């Protein structure tokens, strides 16, 4: 999703206590930031942070890392997190934002970080054949995630795009993940998971587009 440049975003991020500007220095050491033994969950492509802010404030016994590549998005995510935590009268102590290219994710995470779960929400579908390797659920990427996911670690994925979803099912199977469950109509599948609706999700549902979702496990 394209977003206009926001001149305030970079200064605010650099001043934030929960933004990491040098993630490569924390490869294998992310747990030291949280200073506890709670599970770590990772959101790839956090956008404006509407998902991660609500998820993290509701689950203070879980640590969260949210990654995006665009300063403007991360700036909005920072503000969203601050707003949600302030409303809940909670300290921001279980979530960190960082800017990084997800295609190079192995430069900032390894097996010592022991990620328990990955969230991928409405990523770019890259429909053209020559671009499909850029998909966050492509086999090439899934093999990277396996490097830092714990045994039985999970990937939670949702999308509006039929082609991406059907291809992703194949990608997960090719990479040796077990698909625990899947649905082609998340909005009509109660108890599939404790779903937090994103801005994209609401917009697509208002357009009558079904939300596809799956849960996969590293074997």
Image (tube, rainbow, N blue to C red):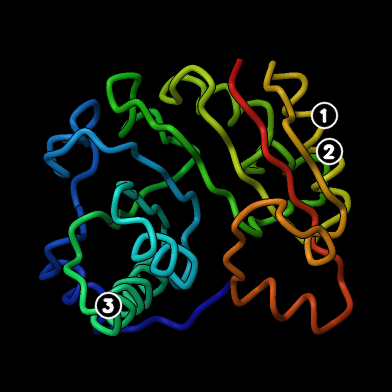
Q: Residue at x 34, y 83 (%)?
A: 6
In contact (CB < 8 Å): disc 2 and disc 3 = no
Q: Is residue 161 above or below residue 142?
A: below
The quadrant holding residue 133 is top right
Residues marked 2 and 1 touching at CB (< 8 Å): yes
| Spatial CA span between label 1 and label 3 | 38 Å
Q: Is residue 160 left or right of residue 108?
A: right
Q: Nearer the viewer, residue 1 or 66?
A: 66
Disc 2: CA contacts within 10 A as few (<14), some (14-19) or many (>=20): some
Which tag is nearer the camera, tag 2 or tag 3?
Answer: 2
Checking the image for residue 167, the label placed there is: 2
Distance Cα–Cα, label 2 vs label 3: 35 Å
- Residue that numbered label 1 is attached to: 170
- What residue is pinned by disc 3? 9
Quarter of the image for the C terminus: give it. top right
| 51 on left or right of 11 | right
Between 79 and 91, the one nearer to me in the picture: 91
Closer to the N terminus: mark 1 or mark 3? Answer: 3
Task: Tell me the SS state at disc 2.
Answer: helix
Sequence-first disc among 2 and 3 = 3
């Amino acid at each position: 999703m394209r977003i206009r440049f926001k001149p305030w975003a970079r200064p605010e991020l650099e001043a934030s206590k929960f933004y990491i500007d040098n993630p490569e220095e924390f490869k294998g050491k992310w747990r030291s930031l949280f200073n506890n033994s709670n599970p770590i969950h990772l959101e790839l492509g956090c956008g404006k942070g509407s998902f991660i802010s609500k998820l993290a404030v509701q689950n203070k016994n879980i640590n969260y890392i949210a990654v995006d590549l665009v300063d403007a998005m991360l700036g909005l995510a920072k503000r969203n997190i601050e707003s949600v935590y302030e409303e809940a009268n909670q300290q921001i102590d279980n979530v960190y934002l960082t800017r990084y290219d997800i295609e190079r994710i192995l430069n900032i995470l390894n097996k010592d970080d022991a990620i328990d779960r990955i969230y991928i929400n409405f990523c770019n579908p890259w429909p053209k054949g020559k671009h499909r390797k850029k998909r966050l659920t492509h086999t090439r990427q899934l093999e990277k995630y396996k490097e830092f996911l714990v045994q039985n670690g999970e990937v939670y994925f949702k999308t509006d795009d039929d082609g991406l979803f059907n291809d992703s099912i194949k990608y997960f199977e090719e990479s040796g993940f077990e698909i625990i469950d899947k649905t082609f109509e998340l909005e009509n599948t109660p108890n599939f998971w404790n779903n937090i609706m994103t801005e994209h999700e609401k917009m697509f549902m208002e357009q009558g587009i079904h939300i596809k979702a799956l849960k996969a496990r590293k074997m």
